[in-house]
Image (tube, rainbow, N blue to C red):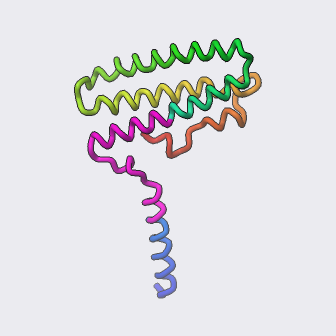
Amino acid sequence: MSPVRTLIVLAAITAASQSLLRAQTACDTAITQTDMNICAKNRADSFERRLGRLILEVTRTVDSSRARALSRVQVLWVRYRDAHCRWDSGAVEGGSMQPMWIADCRAALTEARIAELKHSLCEGGGDCAASRRYDLAPADSAP
């Protein structure tokens, strides 16, 4: 292989390695249970913020009666989600991974709630540009 070709190959390998390293986050390499618990909580909190933005947007697009009804339903839904996740985490109750289990459950149910509600932004339901704003980015979908 010529020296120029070798340099080009090495440069390509270096660039690819650097982009992979940049793509990783601290959560991708978390080893301790404490770090995994923190990452899971941060992910669940991020999903909850996304749901909050969606609900705010939906309430701005519906009449005041439906907005109040959604607010009441959402309070009940949060109670259900939190109670379900506490129950579900009983499999690991008292263990160091229980906080991660609860956070992962919260994230999964919150993402499902986003999937349910985001189509309310589209005339007649379905899929539209407004609903796609609430789709997960590929990096967000990893556990």
In x, y percent, where is residue 125? 71, 23
Furthest-bottom residue in this view: 3
Give above or below for 53 relative to 77.
Answer: below
Which residue occupies the foreground of this view, 21 or 78?
Answer: 78
Please report the residue visible at 56 percent of the width from the left and 43 percent of the height from the top. 137
Q: Main secondary structure of the magenta part?
A: helix
In x, y percent, where is residue 95? 23, 29
**Which quadrant does the C terminus fall into?**
top left
Q: Quadrant of residue 142?
A: top left
Examine the structure image and report whether residue 74 is included in the region drawn in magenta. no
Please report the residue visible at 44 percent of the width from the left and 65 percent of the height from the top. 17
Examine the structure image and report whether residue 36 is included in the region drawn in magenta. yes
Give above or below for 109 relative to 132.
Answer: above
Q: Is residue 5 left or right of residue 70?
A: left
Report how many numbered discs are placed on residues in the image. Answer: 0
In x, y percent, where is residue 21? 43, 60
In x, y percent, where is residue 91? 28, 22
Please report the residue visible at 43 percent of the width from the left and 27 percent of the height from the top. 106
- Range of residues picked out in magenta: 18-46
Q: Quadrant of residue 118?
A: top right
Q: Quadrant of residue 24?
A: bottom left
Furthest-right residue in this view: 123
Q: Is residue 1 left or right of residue 135?
A: left
Please report the residue visible at 76 percent of the width from the left and 25 percent of the height from the top. 123
Q: Is residue 19 left or right of residue 130?
A: left
Which residue occupies the foreground of this view, 90 or 55?
Answer: 55
